[in-house]
Amino acid sequence: MSRTLRLKKAKDFLAISFGIFTFDVLTNKNHMKADLFQAPDYYQLDDLLTEEHKLVRDAAREWVKREVSPIIENYAQKAEFPTQIINGLAEIGAFGPYIPEEYGGAGLDQISYGLIMQEIERGDSGVRSTASVQSSLVMYPIWKYGNEAQRQKYLPKLASGEWIGCFGLTEPNHGSNPSGMETKFKDMGDHYLLNGAKMWISNAPFAQVAVVWAKNEEGRIHGLIVERGMEGFSTPETHNKWSLRASATGELIFDNVKVPKENLLPNKSGLGAPLGCLDSARYGIAWGAIGAAMDCYDTALRYSKERMQFGKPIGQFQLQQKKLAEMITEITKAQLLTWRLGVLRNEDKATSAQISMAKRNNVDMAIHIAREARQMLGGMGITGEYSIMRHSMNLESVITYEGTHDIHLLITGLDITGLNAFK
């Protein structure tokens, strides 16, 4: 689909979505609190965005209001991913936004990608995780490290949502130290034989394709494309999570899996290959965390004007205004940080350390805002009637995956001192 046609569809979608959303609010069709979200823009950042940026963002925002907000709490409660939203994610360009149109992507810039992630995570971090993995950890390495045959085979189906992918790097004994991975493959002449295990893998239970990182017999890390149905490949689901409950998480088990030689990603090897994917994912997370924070702030602000105590709205009390003022300040700082990072990404100037700083800062900001917002709502803050507690629980995962808070601090420390604290 050409960019012009995609943007026209976005405009049509906005008009249709607004009409349906208004009807839903008036009829209370879903018997849940209506999504009345109003995005905070205290420093008028809209002035920094192009019309295309705004159109892409607004289409994603209205889709979340229409398709995600009314159902996501129920799916989180039953710990299930709503697979019916996959086509919608593809329609708003959430799968490979920056992938060239010739491979089914939207051909958008990095700021558009970030804005889409922001709006999706405003709905739920688990849904954003599904889109992040598909875009940055599956489509990105196939596009950047794969050959033309691999791009033509996999990318269009991933962009359309026909196939969902996952990314196998983390192992039971190797999280923050991926270079120690134990998953290995051997050259058997006409195929590779893959053995090992990966864990904490988003999308694993229903993914058709896995981009798996493993060591060859010389200890060099390579990417392999593993497809569901290959003998010896299984994806057991991880249960009993208190976080990312509306996201499917699982393991990848490889028991003498025969991988065709044409499934090796040929154009990059070594630890830098998967870390390049993580840069793209972490960038999206930095934007996504803003969405979660904005939703918590907006909910707390509205509640503070409606909830009466001692004869006046609680928003009139000094401590509540302090909390709200600090929230909007931190959100605004994070918005400026990601916008500048997006400009640097568009110019191909952003460093891994700059991306680490944004991921760490923005997720830390979001989790603190979620906790403060929960306190402002009192007992109501822990109920499913509001999104705050779900955001708070989700962000406990977001602050851990794609590099923990402390690991990102050390990445920044290494960059500014030149001294390696990892060794």
Image (cartoon, rainbow, N blue to C red):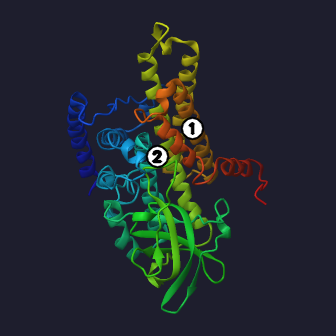
Q: Is residue 352 above or below residue 360?
A: below
Q: Is residue 406 left or right of residue 14?
A: right
Nearest to the observer: residue 337 or residue 202: 202
Nearest to the observer: residue 334 or residue 82: 82
Task: Kindly check if marks 2 and 1 are in contact, taking CB atoms under 8 A apart as contact.
Answer: no
State the residue at coordinates (53%, 85%).
193
Residue 111: x, y in percent? 44, 45
State the residue at coordinates (45%, 78%).
263
Q: Which residue is mark 1?
A: 367
Nearest to the observer: residue 179 or residue 317: 317
Q: Is residue 75 above or below residue 314?
A: below
Label 2 element class: helix
Residue lying farthest to the top in this orientation: 311
Type of amino acid at the residue the image marks with label 1: Ile
Tell me the tag on residue 125: 2
Q: Is residue 105 left or right of residue 145?
A: left
Q: Can the viewer see residue 201 in this picture?
A: yes
Type of amino acid at the residue the image marks with label 2: Ser
